[in-house]
Image: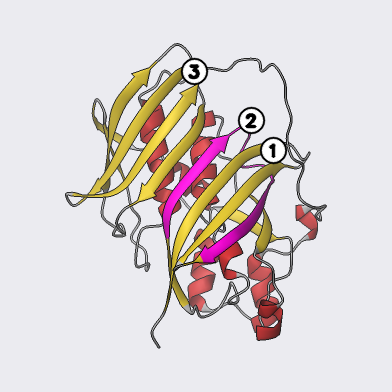
């Protein structure tokens, strides 16, 4: 299985080991901790597998409690909190080696017609994704070649990511940056037709770049890091159906960073400017000792 999109679908295909208990793989990677988007996506799969499938998820709220260890399986225990006429609620606990590393509560809503609609448009007009370079192309242009570690990461990456604004490298560019970022994203290959897979894949992707908005005024996004960062919590609201293997715009901003924590908000739009998802996350930022 060489296509990173196929590997993502496989990663989200949990093994059911009891009625409300599922096991997910955690790839062996040269990372200090399991990627948070992976844990959130797998937990949402576990929650969705205990519903009738007729109600799409409309929101999730999660806490990252401990770093997960790469290469070690994660067990997801689902509590069936409520099955109502319109809403279904599930609580998921992710356990690794006997310790809880993650909690998630997800709510599923029976589709219904709304009495009215409105939405905020994207904050600005942005170029089409096909006209923008990939991250790998931008880094190669700057450095002449990708470092070996980034080359391996680029080959494994399940999403094509294209920054709307050119990456900043110099101290002057960084100092002039506002705490805002926007990227076009889509899976690098087809993800099939299961709506739950697309929702969980986008949940995975939502943790990839959101904290960029916090870092932008402080340091270049690519290159040696001056800060250790970790996701603390994550919340999402799903407004409309979508496909994660089609282009979506992830518009991100950080209203505040203080006390070692930075808050980031994101709005996700399709190519027609329809808002699909809202995201909020807080991250921990600590200066690395040199």
Left or right: residue 204 compared with residue 92: right
Q: Is 180 inside the magenta-drawn segment?
A: no
* Quadrant in the rendering for residue 181: bottom right
| Cα gap from disc 3 to disc 2, whole angstroms | 15 Å
Q: Mark 1 — residue?
A: 275
Q: Give the image location of residue 121, x and y in percent.
A: 77, 42
Instruction: Provide the residue span drawn in magenta.
Output: 231-257
Q: Mark 2 — residue?
A: 240
Tell me: residue 15, above or below residue 205.
above
Residue 54's tag is 3
Q: Residue furthest top?
A: 85
Left or right: residue 147 compared with residue 66: right
Q: Is mark 1 on a helix, strand or loop?
A: strand
| Cα gap from disc 3 to disc 1, whole angstroms | 22 Å
Q: Which of marks 3 and 1 is in front?
A: 1
The residue lying at 50 percent from left, 59 percent from top is 156
Tell me: residue 159, above or below residue 217.
above
Mark 3 crowdedness (10 Å alpha carbons): few <14, some 14-19, many ≥20: few
Residue 284's tag is none
Mark 1 crowdedness (10 Å alpha carbons): few <14, some 14-19, many ≥20: many
Q: Can residue 194 be seen in this view?
A: no
Q: Give the image location of residue 24, x and y in percent.
A: 32, 44
Tell me: residue 276, above or below residue 205.
above
| Cα gap from disc 2 to disc 1, whole angstroms | 8 Å
Mark 3 or mark 2: name the one nearer the start of the chain. 3
């Amino acid at each position: 299985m060489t296509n990173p999109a196929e590997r993502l679908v496989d990663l989200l295909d949990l093994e059911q080991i009891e009625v409300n208990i599922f096991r997910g793989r955690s790839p062996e990677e040269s990372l200090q901790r399991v990627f948070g988007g992976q844990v959130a996506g797998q937990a949402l799969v576990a929650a969705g597998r205990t519903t009738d499938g007729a109600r799409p998820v409309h929101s999730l709220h999660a806490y990252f409690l401990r770093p997960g260890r790469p290469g070690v399986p994660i067990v997801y225990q689902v509590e069936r909190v409520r099955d109502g006429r319109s809403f279904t609620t599930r609580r998921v606990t992710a356990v690794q080696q006997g310790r809880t590393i993650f909690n998630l509560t997800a709510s599923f809503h029976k589709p219904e017609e709304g009495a009215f609609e409105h939405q905020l448009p994207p904050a600005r007009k942005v170029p089409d994704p096909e006209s923008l370079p990939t991250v790998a192309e931008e880094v190669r242009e700057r450095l002449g070649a990708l470092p070996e570690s980034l080359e391996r990461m680029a080959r494994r990456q399940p999403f094509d990511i294209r920054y709307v604004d050119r990456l900043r490298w110099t101290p002057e560019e960084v100092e002039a940056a506002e705490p805002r970022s926007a990227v076009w994203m889509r899976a690098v290959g087809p993800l099939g037709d299961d709506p739950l897979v697309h929702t969980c894949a986008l949940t995975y992707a939502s943790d990839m770049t959101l904290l960029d908005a916090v870092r932008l005024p402080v340091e270049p996004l690519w290159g040696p890091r001056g800060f250790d960062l970790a996701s603390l919590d994550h919340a999402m609201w799903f407004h409309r159906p979508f496909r994660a293997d089609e282009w979506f715009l992830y518009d991100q901003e950080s209203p505040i960073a203080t006390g070692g924590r930075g808050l980031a908000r994101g709005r996700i739009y399709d190519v027609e400017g329809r808002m699909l998802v809202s995201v909020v996350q807080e991250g921990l930022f600590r200066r690395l000792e040199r």
